[in-house]
Image (spheres, rainbow, N blue to C red):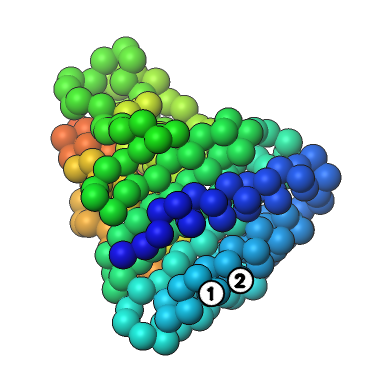
Amino acid sequence: MYDTAFIKEIITNAGKIAKDHFLKVSPTWKEDRSYVTDADLAVQEYLGKALDTHFPDDGIVGEENGLRKAPKAGNRRWVIDPIDGTASYSAGLPVWGVAIALVEGDQPLAGFFYMPMAQDLIYTTPDGQLLRNDQPRTLRDPGPLHRETSLFIASRLHLYYTVSPSYPGKLRNLGASMAHLSYVATGSADAALIERVYIWDIAAGMAMLNAVGGVMRYIDGTPVTLGPLLSGSPMHLPLLAGHPEMVSAFSEIITFNAAGYDDR
């Protein structure tokens, strides 16, 4: 299906490239009003070439410069986020990483995420495991919301969302969507509220959640599918991710204020 050792090798190499640029970049604005740096471009160029050489029949979708390569055979695509958390990376903060996902049709088959500053490598295996630094991990057990329940939140929570004051737990934001998703999947938090982002921000995380019985649902309760996002369009709504019971619990206490959201 895919060569796990090869993907681990190239994603850690990509992390070294990004780390070599760390604290040395000046971000510029893209049309979607997000940041890009020379490090994003260098990492994507490296990964794109490596994947194209090793998997010549597969397609590639990358965040930067409209990278789209159609599959030569079959319906598999590698989805690259060269640096997830570019704003944090540009600010000199440590939580950012490189994400790679394998998607067939609209189904994620594999997900890898490497955070060089934390030396954290989280990835799925062909036999259905989810590993963090080569150790099996899974979701937290669901249960009633309590003081130590942890929800990763969207960065603009104050503008577009209301969390019920009845929620007794904690809200956290690390500045990288894939960090949120991978840490939920490996049991470091209960759920994540993800802004209306792109396929490269969530594909690897969806593969991880699928491996451990987690779900992704849009804020209106409908399931997230990757097919409509392969063109590079953003999600039409924010999403909640985690154990199905926890996603349902948080959907009851989070209100999405859609007014002005598309103009942000």
In this picture, residue 119 sits left or right of residue 111: right
Question: Which dot marks residue 52?
Answer: 1
**Callout 1 environment at 10 Å: few (<14), some (14 to 19), or many (20+)?**
some
Is residue 56 or residue 242 the one in the foreground?
Answer: 56
Which amino acid type corresponds to the residue marked 2 in the rendered image? Lys
Is residue 214 or residue 18 the one in the foreground?
Answer: 18
Q: Is residue 14 above or below residue 96?
A: below
Q: Quadrant of the C terminus?
A: bottom right
Which amino acid type corresponds to the residue marked 1 in the rendered image? Asp
Q: In this view, does 162 lie above or below 65?
A: above
Which type of secondary structure does the marked residue at label 1 adopt?
A: helix
Question: Which dot marks residue 72?
Answer: none
Is residue 113 or residue 160 the one in the foreground?
Answer: 113
Q: Quadrant of residue 3?
A: bottom left
Which type of secondary structure does the marked residue at label 2 adopt?
A: helix
Q: Are marks 2 and 1 in contact (CB under 8 Å)?
A: yes
Q: Distance between the residues labelled 2 and 1?
A: 5 Å
Q: Is residue 247 above or below residue 48?
A: above
In x, y percent, where is residue 46? 65, 64
In x, y percent, where is residue 193? 38, 41
**Callout 2 environment at 10 Å: few (<14), some (14 to 19), or many (20+)?**
few
Residue placed under numbered mark 2 in the picture = 49
In this picture, residue 64 sits left or right of residue 180: right
Residue 95 can be seen in this image:
no
